[in-house]
Image (cartoon, rainbow, N blue to C red):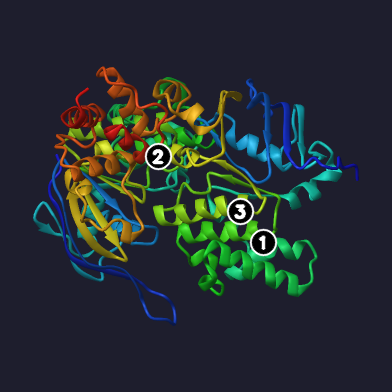
């Protein structure tokens, strides 16, 4: 079960030798609620990946504070504990797979946490199944000989094998095709539902995970621009265009309909959008 | 060098390609024509053969069977490869794989320098390419210190500095945010007006919807070919080819299912909204 992850006035700057520090995050306040799917979205270079690394305990904020389950994350021990609870899937699977077989790769994390024997084997199989890997075909293979999509699943299984309470994914949909994205979305939903985990998806593209997201945190130039649910995102006024971002076609259509006074229950549901359009047209013109 | 005058297209005839050790071909009997001055999208699920096709166009890969004739030059003849690559520049998904320079302008100058051009020409090409890509202000920066989106713009500027007849983009926009992506797509559309042929391999149907023609590969074969309206408007068919249908096409289908007149081949929100008042 996840607990609340809470960032208060978090700032982070990358040290540049001989130059002024480059601020990547400035005064960011953010709550990740237990069991929610939160999308951290922003243009290229907005600080999203830095925020992900701060949330995962890989970078320590220059100022501000992080709390998990109400406890301050302080010092090395605090970061270590945060890293135990928050699992980070990097953008490129090559950054986190390295063992000579898929099984050993997935087992690496839990083994380091002291798991062994049958318990370890079970954990690996569970994680592989959750990530959608065909167990018997693949566990003895080298992860480096797999397709890009399969490598991603191995990397995801490696993170899931640590049973993270908060699962954080950095641009997980880049390079995946429709089936790959569907597959990943359903793995994430299943992990959240079965474990009560929170999920944070960091992305520059709002279309990939649109139906899956509970709330969107929009970040720009290192600052938190707004936090909205899907309805809030389509209702206009978020200033996305000024940030160089765009809603997915679903959202643009929903926004246009709302603007015409057409009520919508769920802007992500095609049936709902079609029904709303039909009743609008009927009201105006008859059928 | 043998060259057929007047053939400015890229012509794929029964193109097949097998990777060594793979039982099924990556490309299997593909016939396609790419033309200068057109924006042409190549779509398909992962593993469908899109990137293999892109690499066959400029002789990075040579057909196992069939033929690719690129601007009149047969790609299977080793002596043609340099000339072919002058005509046809490539940009890949991950810009890190093609960065060599220590500054952005050096990076962009790399290709023209290899052509042995005079310094003044190189300067002109580099400045022009940086301006077209909208990154003149990054000229003195270190490429590896830029964001992914900026790096991709550098890679595209590098390709443009070659002043190619064709630009092949292998998912070059997939890491870019909306603003950078729009800029690249506008740039591609503008280049077609100057006679450059754009071959854009992509997962994004919204980008393919802007193209003059769309080709869809599936299992190494050509599964569909035509205008975006012909190829992309039926959600079931699009899904069967392993792609995410455009939301407006799904909503249009739902409207028909609810017993309303089908809005017809719509690709954009504006087209679908016109149904409201039709």
Instruction: Give me the C-alpha separation between circle 1 and circle 2.
Output: 38 Å
* Front residue of A258 and B139: A258
Instruction: Give me the C-alpha separation between circle 3 and circle 1.
Output: 13 Å
- At a point 17% along the width and 44% down the height, the residue shown is A231
> Please, what secondary structure does the residue beneath circle 1 have?
loop
Q: Please, which chain is the residue tagged with disc 1 on?
A: B
Are circles 3 and 1 on residues that touch, CB within 8 Å? no
Residue that carries the numbered disc 1 in the rendered image: B161
Which disc is residue A155 wearing?
2
Residue that carries the numbered disc 3 in the rendered image: B191
Label 2: few (<14), some or many (≥20) within 10 Å?
Answer: many
> What x and y, as percent, mark residue A153?
40, 34
> What x and y, as percent, mark residue A70?
8, 55
Whether residue A161 is visible, yes or no, is: no
> What x and y, as percent, mark residue A75?
21, 65
Are circles 2 and 3 on residues that touch, CB within 8 Å? no
Residue B238: quarter of image = top left
> What x and y, as percent, mark residue B57?
70, 39
Label 3: few (<14), some or many (≥20) within 10 Å?
Answer: many
């Amino acid at each position: 079960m996840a607990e609340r992850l809470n960032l208060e006035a978090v700032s982070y700057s990358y040290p540049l030798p001989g130059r002024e520090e480059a601020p990547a995050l400035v005064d960011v306040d953010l709550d990740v609620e237990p069991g929610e799917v939160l999308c951290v979205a922003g243009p290229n270079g907005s600080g999203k990946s830095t925020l992900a690394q701060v949330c995962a305990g890989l970078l320590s904020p220059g100022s501000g504070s992080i709390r998990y389950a109400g406890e301050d994350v302080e010092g090395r021990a605090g970061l270590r504990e945060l890293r135990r609870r928050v699992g980070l899937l990097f953008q490129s699977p090559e950054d986190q797979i390295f063992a000579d077989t898929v099984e050993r790769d997935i087992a690496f994390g839990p083994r380091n946490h002291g798991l062994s024997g049958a318990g370890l084997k079970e954990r690996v199989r569970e994680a592989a199944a959750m990530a959608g890997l065909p167990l018997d075909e693949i566990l003895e293979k080298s992860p480096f000989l797999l397709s890009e999509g399969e490598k991603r699943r191995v990397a995801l299984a490696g993170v899931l094998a640590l049973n993270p309470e908060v699962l954080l994914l950095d641009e997980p949909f880049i390079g995946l095709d429709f089936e790959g994205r569907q597959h990943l979305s359903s793995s994430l939903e299943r992990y959240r539902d079965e474990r009560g985990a929170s999920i944070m998806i960091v992305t520059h593209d709002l279309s990939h995970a649109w139906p899956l997201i509970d709330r969107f945190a929009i970040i720009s130039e290192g600052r938190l621009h707004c936090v909205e649910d899907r309805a809030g995102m389509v209702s206009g006024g978020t200033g996305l265009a000024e940030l160089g971002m765009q809603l997915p076609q679903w959202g643009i259509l929903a926004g246009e309909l709302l603007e015409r006074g057409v009520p919508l229950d769920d802007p992500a549901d095609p049936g709902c959008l079609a029904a709303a359009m039909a009743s609008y047209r009927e009201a105006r013109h008859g059928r | 060098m043998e060259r057929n005058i007047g053939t400015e297209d890229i012509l794929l005839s029964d193109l097949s390609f097998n990777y060594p050790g793979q039982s099924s071909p990556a490309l299997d009997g593909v016939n396609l024509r790419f033309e200068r001055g057109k924006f042409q999208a190549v779509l398909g699920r992962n593993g469908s053969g899109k990137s293999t096709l892109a690499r066959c166009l400029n002789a990075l890969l040579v057909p196992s069977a069939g033929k690719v004739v690129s601007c009149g030059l047969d790609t299977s003849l080793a002596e043609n490869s340099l000339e072919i690559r002058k005509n046809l520049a490539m940009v890949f998904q991950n810009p890190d794989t093609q960065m060599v320079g220590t500054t952005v302008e050096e990076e962009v100058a790399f290709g023209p320098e290899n052509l042995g051009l005079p310094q003044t020409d190189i300067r002109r090409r580099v400045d022009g390419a940086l301006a077209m890509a909208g990154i003149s202000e990054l000229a003195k920066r270190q490429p590896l210190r830029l964001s992914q989106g900026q790096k991709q713009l550098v890679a595209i500027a590098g390709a443009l500095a070659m002043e190619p007849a064709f630009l092949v983009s292998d998912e070059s926009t997939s890491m870019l945010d909306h603003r950078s992506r729009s800029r690249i797509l506008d740039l591609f559309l503008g280049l077609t007006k100057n006679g450059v042929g754009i071959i854009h391999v992509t997962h994004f149907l919204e980008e393919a919807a802007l193209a003059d023609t769309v080709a869809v590969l599936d299992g190494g074969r050509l599964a569909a070919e035509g205008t975006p309206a012909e190829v992309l408007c039926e959600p079931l068919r699009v899904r069967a080819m392993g792609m995410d249908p455009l939301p407006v096409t799904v909503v249009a289908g739902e409207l028909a299912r609810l017993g309303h007149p089908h809005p017809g081949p719509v690709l954009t929100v504006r087209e679908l909204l016109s149904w409201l008042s039709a």
